[in-house]
Amino acid sequence: MVEARWRLVRGVPSAEPDPAVLDDATLPSMEIAAPGPVGHLVAGSELEAADPDTVDDSDWWLVAMVTVERSGVVDFQGLTPPGAVFVDRVRVADVESMFLPVRCPMTAGTHEIAIWSGSLRTWLSRRRPRGRWRSTLVSAQGMRWARTSLIGRAPVYGGVPPVVGAWRPVVVRPGPQVDLCSVGVDSDTGRVDMCARWTGAEAPDVATAEVLDEEGATVAVGDLSARAGSPAELVGQVALAEPRRWYPHGYGAPSTYLLRITAGGVSAERRIGFRTVRAACAGGAFRLSVNGIDVFCRGAVWVPPDPRAMTVDREVIREQLLVLRDAGANMVRVMGGFTPEQAEFYELCAELGMLVWQDAMLTTFDPPEDLDDVVCAEVDDLLTRHAGNPALAVVSGGSETLQQPEMMGVATESLSLPLIETKLRGVVERVSGVPYVVASPSSWSDDTEAPTPLAIRSDNGIAHWFGVGGYMNGLDDVRTAGVRFAAESLAFAIPASDEAVESDFGSLGAAGQHPDWKRGVPRDRTASWDFEDVRDFYVREMFGVDPLQVRRVDPGRYLQLGRLAVAEAMVNCYRFWRRPDSGCAGALVLNAKDLRPGAGWGLLDHRGTAKLPLAALARVWAPVALTIDNCGQRGLRIDLHNDTADELAGIVRLRAVDDAGRVVVEGESAIVVEPWSSVTRADADLTGAFTDLSHAYRFGPPVAAAVLVEFVVGEQVMRRDALIVAPLAAPIRSGLRAQARTDDAGGWLIDVRAETSLRYVCLNVPGWVLSDNCFHLVAEHTHTIRATPADGTAPQASGPRGAVSSIDARETVAVVAPAVVASTAVGPSAAS
């Protein structure tokens, strides 16, 4: 039994901690339920300051009287520096990195545990050697010496308190312990090599290992024995006869196993999987293959689900990963400058088939050589704790560690960075064996006599590409940039839903100008513009309107045009990148989630709710995806992608319609798509004749107003895409209607139809997950969408309720039940 009473104390900044200050009853303090980050603990209390940055101004103490019945250990899973741990006023550990756990022995009895987290601002005031270049993320260049997170400290990651204190749990573990300290999985032989460490008296001579499948059945058993000369270390192996392979989402089943070690009556467990992962890096390319299958990686840069609390329930992580995975994502990146995630994140990524790109916690600073051993220890600890996890696919030496000096004009050909070039590579090869890249971004050359291309180049190696996005190039820039793999891309200030904006800011009118709103819009520290300016640029380019004038008279339409401009930009890029001949093997969006309310980079808002562009991305991210692209005088290009392990056979059907929805050109072709492959067709391959459906030759009016392409298997439309060749000049009365109905199994469908071809038809159906949204609709052709209750319960008898709109339609209509007239209007459209 463990009893503990915790207290948080704010102290005066000091160079060295003295636990005697805890006897001063005049220091501000508060009782707390459990340790946590200071900014989270003080929220809503008298200790909370108006400015979250002031968390770094004070010393903070977490103090508890802890009673344990048996001797054991205390695991401090994450403490921030500068810091120290005291037990009964005796200093037992120093904290030099927030990314390294601390463990202390604990004897039976009652003890005072005191955790000191010193003022980082005071610590930064000491003089230290300058770096060879300056980081543009923060003004305090001494941060290069601080092994801590930039969340809440770099303006672009601001709006939340800096991470200070016990940012991961403090766990008192009485009695002897056994911990897995290394796991090696050989996917070819099915062998699992293990090393466990015993903590406590009288280490057992033998331990048992068992491997359980996903149904809980034991599929292999083995023994571990004490290592010669080191009785506290137990080593052994176990083998599976025919292990199931783990595949990323869409490419096969993400099969995993549970490895359980039992020694002296206590156990340790780890989720493992069998897979090979390799990176092809020849010719400037970067392409991952899993189990010999090339993978097109898509997803986003992961953001802590709760940047204040930092540690969240497993289900919160699962829900946010599921939103991304169900949209077709198969990779997330844990970025340098943030924090490594809690153990449940890596386990859930394995369970859900999400590859993990893991950065070392290095970013734009010149890493001091004095900290090389600390950084190597951080990566060693992280990889050791997750060795055997099949989701871990790439380790990088940091984020923009090479790009920053290039952008500052440093002569990089003579720049030596042994930490990321050799030392971290050695750690990764020894502990995990997954592919390692020196930094993100980075480039390379096959010609040893030629100079290495700059890391900032988009057409070689790993890119951080914002040609479409921050640098405000046209959408066609994606076709000339030559991106091989983008570990970051497509950053926009994406508005959350109208409901979220009204909840957070009280009115849609706050968008674009209110100080509270602007605090949530990302901006590079040295830039004279922010990412809302970027979004407005694409609104102007795509829709031919002045977004500022629209905002003045109709903030709802302004926000919707912004969402749709971002959706179109993202879909345009992924449509091209996913082509087999694009040369691109993957791209990740910056970011997965917002840190705070407003229009952040996230595909999810700060609550974890999907924003509109994710619905559009889901069509081009799907494991089976159909895309249609206007390629000018080459006609319409149709690509059908099949990531799955199954052969697809069906009919690709094309219908081109005029303004009234009458079919003017049509055709179809039988098609077979092999597993893990794509097939490309032109419109003439389906129609059998040249018809200028792309309207590139312009001999007269467009042949068609819109083109619909469907992939039909049996009688079922498996995938569809539409192209509006001749968009409307202004919103009109479109005859838009939406009707809900049940299928034979009792599930709910929504049929959407209009008299005119419409762009960006969007449904707002609270409480329901839709199979498609933010789509183009071809005149007088019904698009059927499946609606599933968001809470996973049985479909409601009353069916889905909500509204449907389009930027081309003057009306917004209700989703109605079968007994109600389908054209019932619910109000003016956001486009009106």
Image (cartoon, rainbow, N blue to C red):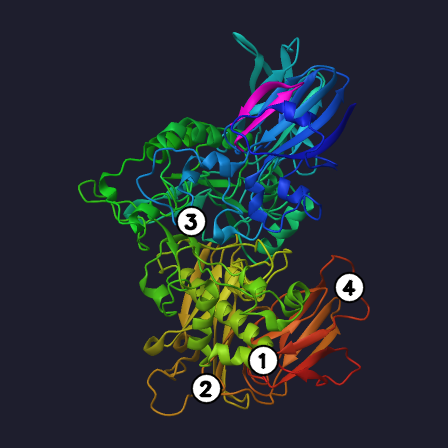
Query: Which residue carries the number 3 mark?
Result: 137
Query: Label 3 vs label 2: CA separation?
Result: 50 Å
Q: Indicate the position of residue 214 as horizontal and vertical percent values.
A: 66, 38
Q: Indicate the position of residue 6 as horizontal and vertical percent values.
A: 73, 31
- Between 95 and 252, which is closer to the camera in this rendering? 95
Is 131 rendered above or below residue 369? below
Query: Which residue carries the number 2 mark?
Result: 704
Prevailing secondary structure class for the magenta stretch in the rendered image: strand
Query: Label 1 vs label 2: CA separation?
Result: 32 Å
Query: Which residue carries the number 4 mark?
Result: 795
Q: Which residues are magenta?
A: 81-95
Residue kind at label 1, given as amino acid type: Asp
Determine if the magenta segment contains residue 94: yes
Q: Please report contact status of discs 1 and 4: CB closer than 8 Å, yes or no.
A: no
Q: Indicate the position of residue 682 as horizontal and vertical percent values.
A: 39, 73
Determine if the magenta segment contains residue 527: no
Q: Is residue 193 visible?
A: no
Helix, strand or loop for disc 2: loop
Outermost residue, right direction? Answer: 797
In front: label 1 or label 2: 1
Query: Label 3 vs label 4: CA separation?
Result: 48 Å
Residue kind at label 4, given as amino acid type: Pro
Q: Please report contact status of discs 3 and 4: CB closer than 8 Å, yes or no.
A: no
Query: Which residue carries the number 1 mark?
Result: 554
State the residue at coordinates (60%, 47%): 307
Q: Please report contact status of discs 1 and 2: CB closer than 8 Å, yes or no.
A: no
